[in-house]
Amino acid sequence: MQRWNSSSLPIFEPGLEEVVGRCRGRNLFFSDDIDGAIREADLIFISVNTPTKDFGLGSCQLARATVGGILPHVSWLQPDGTFLKRDLVKPSLQ
């Protein structure tokens, strides 16, 4: 978490450093205070590695584990119970 909040990001993705630098502290925050971050959030963006299974489909194991870890802290589910919508579109930094 410390590296996400520094100028030395823990991963490399072309353009990521500039985007994070421009948005961090304004509308992008990194925190390990799960309760506090969820309480203050309008939106929770979860990004996890989705390794490919042997037969070509993406594994959602890490996403399920991440959601399972934060779900007990969430008190603002939609009236229909919606919490997460899965989108497999690769994000663009443009």
Image (cartoon, helix red, strand yellow):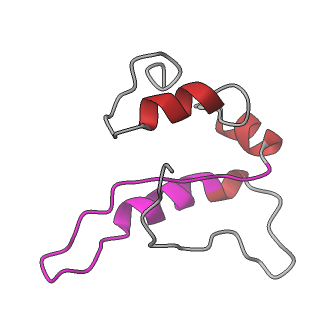
Q: Position of residue 50 (x, y in %)?
A: 32, 62
Q: Residue at x 83, y 60 (%)?
A: 76
87 in relation to 92, above or below? below
* Left or right: 18 in relation to 52: right
Q: Is residue 45 magenta?
A: yes
Farthest residue in the left direction?
54
**Magenta stretch prevailing secondary structure:** loop
| Viewer-side residue, 94 vs 3 | 94
Q: Position of residue 36 (x, y in %)?
A: 75, 35
Task: Please give the range of residues in magenta.
Answer: 42-70
Q: Residue at x 54, y 53 (%)?
A: 46
20 in relation to 40, above or below? above
Q: Position of residue 83 (x, y in %)?
A: 69, 69
Q: Position of residue 8 (x, y in %)?
A: 39, 18
* Left or right: 33 in relation to 8: right
| Viewer-side residue, 75 vs 4 | 4
Using the rendered view, name the quadrant where residue 71 is placed. Answer: bottom right
* Left or right: 37 in relation to 86: right
| Viewer-side residue, 82 vs 43 | 43
63 in relation to 78, above or below? above
Using the rendered view, name the quadrant where residue 12 is placed. Answer: top left
Q: Residue at x 48, y 26 (%)?
A: 4
Q: Is residue 91 magenta?
A: no
